[in-house]
Amino acid sequence: MRHWFFVALAAIAVQAPAQDVAIVGARIEIGNGKSIPKGNILIRDGRIADIGETVTVPPGFATYDAAGTTVYPGFIDGLTSAGLKIPAAPEATTPPPTNTTAPATMWEQNRRGIRGRVNAADCMDLAGILADAHKAGITSALFSPGSG
């Protein structure tokens, strides 16, 4: 729960440029698979001015102790179906005779929504959606059709 507090705090600090803010002692996810185990973030005039383990907080900064929390480089949308256009499932056909074909568990209509012939990249229309999400601070998302 505290993780989201500091992401929100960073977003608020960026939108309120009148106050300089320091988030200190947090684990900082950089966004490229690397992290800083215990670092500081300085936000000056609404922009991130410095990040690192050895960054010192100048006088006059509002300081927030973030020990034991993680700060991410953006918001994470844990589940969205925005921009996905999944084609309709093919209509079920009469199963073929079992003595001349694969077992029933292998028939495509028995796979409960799994459709190996659907290319996920062809089902995504994300041009406008990604731009809007990025403007809102979302940098990562998990896409799912919602129906399995």
Image (cartoon, helix red, strand yellow):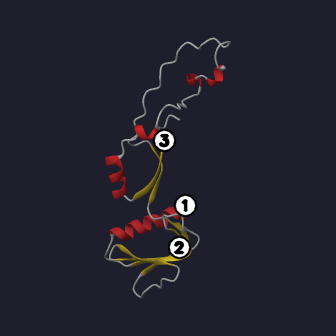
The mark lying in front, picked from 2 and 3, is 3
Q: In this image, 119 relative to 110: left or right?
A: left
Q: Dot 1, how many residues are within 10 Å of its Cα: few (below 14), some (14-19), or many (20+)?
A: few
Measured as percent of width and height from the top left, residue 126 is found at 36, 45
**Residue under the point 65% across and 23% down:** 105
> Which quarter of the rendering shows the N terminus?
bottom right
The circle drawn on residue 66 is: 2
- In this rendering, does residue 23 appear at all? no
Q: What residue type is labelled 3?
A: Ser
- Is tag 1's residue or tag 3's residue first in the polypeptide sequence? 1
Q: What residue type is labelled 1?
A: Met
Measured as percent of width and height from the top left, residue 19 is found at 35, 77
Q: Which amino acid does label 2 sit on?
A: Ala
**Residue under the point 63% across and 24% down:** 106
Q: What is the CA distance from the residue labelled 1 to the residue labelled 2? A: 12 Å
- In this rendering, does residue 142 appear at all? yes
Figure label count: 3
Q: What is the CA distance from the residue labelled 1 to the residue labelled 3? A: 24 Å
**Residue under the point 47% across and 22% down:** 90
Residue farthest front in this picture: 100
Q: Name the residue under label 1.
A: 1
In the picture, residue 109 is in which quadrant?
Answer: top right
Q: What kind of element bears circle 1? A: loop
- Is tag 1's residue or tag 2's residue first in the polypeptide sequence? 1
Measured as percent of width and height from the top left, residue 34 is found at 54, 67
Q: What kind of element bears circle 3? A: loop
Q: Mark 3 points at which residue?
A: 144
Please tell me whether residue 9 is drawn above or below residue 112 in the rendered image. Answer: below
Q: What kind of element bears circle 2? A: loop
- The answer to which of 114 and 16 lies nearer the viewer is 114
